[in-house]
Image (spheres, rainbow, N blue to C red):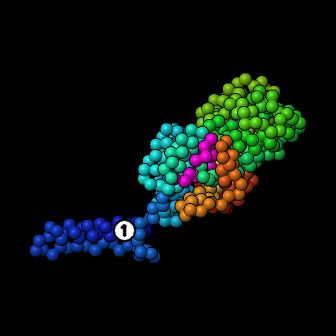
Amino acid sequence: MIKRNLLLVLTVFVMAAMVLSACGGAQTPEVTEPEPVEEPEEPAEPAEELAVGIVLPTKDEPRWIQDETRFRDALDEAGYDVEILFSQGSSAKEKENVEALITKGVQVLIICPHDGTAAAAAAEAAAEAGVKVISYDRLIRDTDAVDYYVTFDSIQVGAQQAQYLVDRAEGTGNPLYLYAGAASDNNAFLFFRGAWQVLQPKVADGTFEIVNSDEAVALSDKAELTRQEEANIIGQVTTNWDFNVAKNLAEANLTVAPAEQKGDVFILAPNDGTARAIADAFAADNDVTSYVVTGQDAEKASVQYIIDGKQSMTVLKDVRNLVQDAINAAVALLQGNEPMAEGSYDNGVKDVPAIPSEVIAVDADNVQEALIDSGYYSADDFENLP
Ligand code: BGC
């Protein structure tokens, strides 16, 4: 910042001097000295261009604004100037963004697809132009035009959500409401798979009774589901990652559920935005006496909901780590090296190398330690921290 301010002041100063000397004639121009500015430690230089472009899915969810902010922080710190574009929930806009970046000469594309399958065309356009493609957070499916996948451990996200519910359920016949992400997002399948692994034995032994998906009820003896079976369940309980869809679906489920499937309920909500919408719908139902509801992303609004007792937990996915993994992978690819990998993810056509980053379950008991003491957020962002 100081560097940029100094540059600006110097530029204005030089321009002012030039204008004054051009029109000054015989008079000696009075050039006032600029206000003294703090000396930077290094000589001023503009941020270095990094031949990388970033495409994120939408500005309408705090999660992706978080990623943008963390990318900007990390890139500024490293002195890189990189373009970040948003696709606003449209695969067509996403492809335009990718084409614009290719035209500008990026050599590495970091892209979080709006729709994992539809994004294959954008990835292929990039690969044909010789651009390396890093799939960011969400996997691009059904194409070999993906070089690397930067991700959190999404199976663990679902498993931690489900474990939270299991740990709080006593006796048998506890009503369980399932909700999932968008079927166009491969992560929705991974989250659900991770959750199913933990929940299914507890449905089979009678601890839980699934209320709102007859597909899930029909499959409740099966420990491992095929992708098609997962799709059948997700099709019944999808929120499409949309707060309004989530709210309407929860209300519709509560309208048809009899009072005995309410009382003390357990809710698998896939992420924070949908969790808040679903929690509000359950809180408004007079037959619901208590609810345990999961979430994901540690969005500030949900952290406040957790402090206020309106959401039970979230899963912290430390975006700073994901951003750093993405930058490291991009730099490795630019240097002609293979980014580090610890395993791979099947995208339907190719096993894409990846390092899955760790995730942490957060509730009222560890919110201070996990989110404030760790420096992820500032205590000032919240009211009534425990
Ligand atoms: C991300 C989540 C996010 C969701 C909705 C998923 O692919 O992994 O963090 O909440 O999309 O945007």
Residue 23, by quadrant, is bottom left
Depicted 106 relative to depicted 207: above or below: below
- Under mark 1, the amino acid is Leu
Residue at image location 35% in from the left, 74% down from the top: 36
Q: As rendered, which of 155 and 257 lies closer to the eye?
A: 155
Which quadrant would the C terminus be assigned to in this image?
A: bottom right
In the image, residue 303 lies in the stretch drawn in magenta? no
Side (left or right) of 269 relative to 6: right
**Quick one: label 1, few (<14), some, or many (20+) residues within 10 Å?**
some
Side (left or right) of 324 relative to 231: left
Q: Where is residue 241 in the image (x, y as percent from the top left)?
A: 62, 38
Range shown magenta? 131-145
Residue at image location 80% in from the left, 31% down from the top: 219
Q: Position of residue 59 (x, y in %)?
A: 52, 45
In the image, residue 137 lies in the stretch drawn in magenta? yes
* Residue holding disc 1: 7
Q: Position of residue 373 (x, y in %)?
A: 67, 62
Q: Is residue 250 visible?
A: no
Q: As rendered, which of 86 and 383 lies closer to the eye?
A: 86
Helix, strand or loop status at disc 1: helix
Depicted 74 relative to depicted 100: above or below: below
Residue at image location 71% in from the left, 54% down from the top: 343
